[in-house]
Image: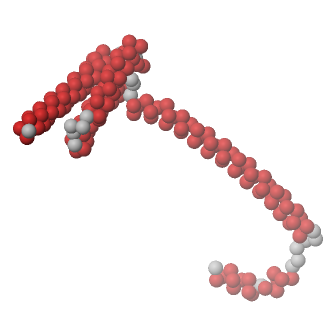
Amino acid sequence: MKDLDKIIQENKLDFDSFEPNEGHFDRFEQKLIVYNNKKKSFSFAYILKAAVIAILVTLSGLWVYDNLDTRSNKGIALSEISPEYGEVEMYYTHLVNQKYGEINQSESFDSTQKIILVQELKEMDSIYENLKKDLITNPSDKRVINAMIQHYQLKVKVMNQILDQLHQAQNINKQKSKNYESTNI
């Protein structure tokens, strides 16, 4: 780099004595105008194309997420296999929801007992969710379908036992309070 500076300094008079050809500045100005016009149209078209591509990528990503990820995470319900299984599923779902309501309305539990009970029932639900995912891989597998139905039956049976024990505890408490009242009179 120092050599180039040295050459320029030594030949300064030669470089300063030459003038550009006539019309040079006009031609240069015309080239700048053409370049600036191309640059503006290019950037607008580029931005427009990039926006279209971004929209398409976003929409396709949303479609894939909605259609593929949802089904693989949630699994297949029995109602998607056949209408008969759909009726069975609807019956047990209604029954389980009814039992949930009875358990939640019961005042025999304290808050920690209710929390523990709800967590246990949610663990049972996670088993059912795994069965739904298994049904995706083989929707005609009768073993998986029967396991799902047995799961509902077992859950209803467990909830009935809980409710029976609650009723027994309430009856014992009523009996104790009657005995206590009769001894105080």
- Quarter of the picture holding the C terminus: top left
From the viewer's perspective, tell me whether residue 185 is left or right of residue 36. Answer: left
Looking at the image, residue 13 lies above or below residue 158: below
Left or right: residue 106 versus residue 94 is left
Image location (x, y in percent) of residue 47: 69, 50
How many marks are shown on the rendered structure? 0
What residue is at 77 percent from the left and 85 percent from the top? 11
Q: Residue at x 88, y 62 (%)?
A: 30
Q: Is residue 155 shown above or below 51?
A: above
Residue 26, image quadrant: bottom right
Residue 13 appears in the figure? yes
* Rendering coords of residue 62 (x, y %): 54, 38
Return the residue nearer the eye: 46 or 177. 177
x 29%, y 35%: residue: 104
Q: Position of residue 141 (x, y in %)?
A: 32, 17
Quarter of image, res 103:
top left
Of 144 and 91, the residue lying toward us: 91
